Image (cartoon, rainbow, N blue to C red):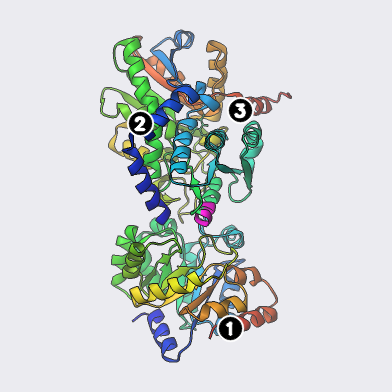
Amino acid sequence: MSRIGKKFRDIVKRGGKAFIPYIMAGDPDLGRTAELVRILEDCGADIIELGVPFSDPLADGPTIQKAAQRALSGGVTLHKVIDLVADLRKRSEIPLLLMTYYNPIFKYGEERFVHDASEAGVDGIIVPDLPPEEAGNILSFSRKSDFDIIFLVAPTSTEDRIGRVSKSSRGFIYYVSITGITGSKLSMDSSISSHVSKIRSMSGKPVAVGFGISTPEEASEVARFADGVIVGSAIVKRASDPDASLRDYLLSLRKAIA
Amino acid sequence: MPALNELEKAYSALGKDRDFKREIDLLLKTYVGRPTPLYFAKRLSDYLGGARIYLKREDLAHTGAHKINNALGQALLAKKMGKKRLIAETGAGQHGVATATGAALCGLECEIYMGSDDIVRQSLNVFRMRLLGANVVEVAIGSRTLKDAINEAMRDWTTNVRSTHYVLGTVFGPHPFPLIVRDFQSVIGREAKKQVLDAEGRLPDYLIACIGGGSNAMGLFHHFIDDEEVKMIGVEAGGKGIVPGEHAARFAGGSLGVLQGTKSFLLQDDDGNILGTHSVSAGLDYAAVGPEHAFLRDSGRARYTFATDDEALRAFELLSKTEGIIPALESSHALAEAVKLVPVLPKDNVVIVNLSGRGDKDVQQVARIKGIEL
Ligand SMILES: Cc1ncc(COP(=O)(O)O)c(C=O)c1O
C-alpha cells in the first residue's frame, strides 16, 4: 500500500479528516520549499502537495500562476523538484504528491518519470490536464510501483464520468469544489456534500475537496462531509509571511479540519 | 471534459440537421459575402515571371478575414445549444472581431481575451470589437500574446461552462475543436476547387497558406487532400530567424508535446515549458500548431516552411503595389513563400495563395516599423 493509502487508513481509523496543503515548489527558491515542508509537517499536515511550476498553468488562478512564474524564473524544473523530494525523504516520511501539468511529464518521458519520481520518494501525482482516457500509459507504468495517480472530478461531471474517474483514480479522488480555477471564491452549497457522498459511494475511495478553500470556517464546513481538505492558493499567498503568522494560520486550519 | 462531451454531442447532432446547414449557407451568402472570389493576380504573376498565381480572396469576406467562417458557425451552434455568452481568444484581433460579430448577430454576450502586446499592435481591431458590443479583456501574464489569451479563455470556460460557449479560433485545442473549425473553414477549399476548375479547367499545382494555428490552411487544404497531384505548402512565422524565442516556426524549431488539450508540435524547452515566440504578425505568433498539420507533415502530404518578418513585410508591400491589395501580415507570409517559389516554376503551373485577410489592421504597425508617424 502507498504512503497515501496508509495515511487515509490511519485517519479513518482514528475518525479524523486529512489536511492536505499545497505549496509551489521553488517559490521563491527550493530552500524555502524545504523549510515550508517542515513547517507544514509541524503544523499537522497529513499529505503535502508540491506544485511543479509550468509556463501555462491552465487550471490555476493568478496566485498560483504568479508563484509558478517566480519559481520558473529561479530555474526550477520537474527534475529539480524530484531531486528535492529525494532530499526531503532523508528526514521525512510524510506522503508527498506532485501537482504538475502533463507536458513536463511527457517531455521527461512517462516511464522514466514514474520510475525516477517513485525512486525519489514521490507518492503520486495530480495532473489537472490529463483525463483518465488519455492516461493509459502512465497508469500502466504506475501499477508497477506504489505510485498513485489522482484524477479530478468537477461539479459538472456526469455519472458516467464519475464512474470512469473512480475506476482509474488511486490514493484518493480529488473533488473540485467549484467550476473554475484555483483560488476562486468558494460558494458553499449543499450540492458539494451530496456530490462527495455520491463519489465516495460509487468509488469506495476517499474523496478530498479542493479549489477555493481559504478560511478555517470553510475548511471546517468541508471537513464535515469530505475525507480530506486541500488548501492551495490561500497558503501560497502566505508562503512568504513571517513564520510565526504562517504557523498560526496553518494551525487554525488544522484545528478546523477534524 | 464534460463541456467537450456536450459540445461534441451537440455538434454531431446539428451536423445532420438540414435546417441548420441551410441557415448557415444563407448567412454565408448574404451576410459574409461568399463565395469569395478566386482572383488571377496577373501583374504579380508577370512580375515574378513563373507560374500563374491566383489569390483566394478571404480578405473580402465580411470583417476582413477567413475567421468569420468559423466564428459565425460556432455562434449559431452556441445559440442552438442554449448558451447565453460567447468567449474567444484573439491574436491579430480578426477572430475576436469575427466572434464579436457573430455574437451581435445572434444576440449573445461576448467577451474577448487578448494579450497586452497584441492589444497594442492591433489597436484598431480592439476598438472594432468594442464597437460590436464585446468586452475586451487584457491578458498581461506569460508572453502576453495569443497563447496566454487561450489560457485565459480556457480558464473562463471552465468557470462559466454552463452559460458559455468558447469559440476557439483555429484548428487547435481539444477534440472536437480542430474538427469543428476545419469543417466551418473547409468552405474555402470547396469554393476554390470549383473556381479553379472553372478558370483553368484543371486542379492547381500548389496551394500555399500561412499557419498560425492552421485554420485558413486547413480550410483551403481539406478538399484537396485526396488530389495527390496538388502540392500543399504551409508557411509559419520565421520571425527574426530560427533562434529560440525569436520565431514561431513550430516545425522548424519545435518538438512533440501537449498543450491546451492538444498533442502536436510545440516550441518548448527541455523541461517541457513553453517558449516565448516572436512574429511581426500577431496571428502567427503562437507556440503550437494544429494537430492535423503535424499529421500532414508526418505523412508527407503537406510541406511546411517559414517566412521571416522581413520577407513578409516585403511581400506585404509588393502585393499592395502590384495588385492594389493590402494583405494582412499573416497572409503576407504565404505570399512571401510564393515570391520564393513561383519564379522557379514552369509558366503553365497554377498556384493558389490563400489571402486569409486584409491588411487594414496592420497599416499602423507597418508604419511604426518603418519609422513613419501617422
Ligand atoms: C488574416 C489572418 N490570417 C491567418 C491567421 C492565422 O490563423 P490560422 O492559422 O488559424 O488561419 C490569422 C489569425 O489571427 C489572421 O487574422
Q: Does the image show residue A39?
A: yes
Q: Which residues are magenta?
A: B155-160
User: Which residue type carries mark 3?
Assistant: Lys
Q: CA distance from mark 2 to mark 3?
A: 29 Å
Residue at numbered disc 1: A256
Q: Position of residue A101 (x, y in %)?
A: 46, 59
Question: Cβ(mark 3) to ligand 1 < 8 Å?
Answer: yes
Say few, some or many: other residues with alpha carbon within 10 Å of mark 3 (under 14 / 14 to 19 / 20 or more): many
Q: Describe residue B347's horizontal placement relative to residue B227 as left or right.
A: right
Magenta part, dominant SS: helix
Q: CA distance from mark 1 to mark 3?
A: 56 Å
In primary-sequence order, the first of circles 2 and 3 is 2
The residue under the point 35% across, 62% down is: A161
From this viewpoint, which residue is outermost toward the right?
A: B373
Is residue A9 shown above or below B370?
below
Tag in front: 1 or 3: 1
Q: Position of residue B323 (x, y in %)?
A: 53, 12
Which residue is tagged 2? B303
Which residue sits at x=33%, y=12%?
A: B198
Magenta stretch: includes residue B229? no
Residue with the mark numbered 3: B361
> In what element is the residue under mark 1?
helix
Report the quarter where the N terminus of chain A lies.
bottom left
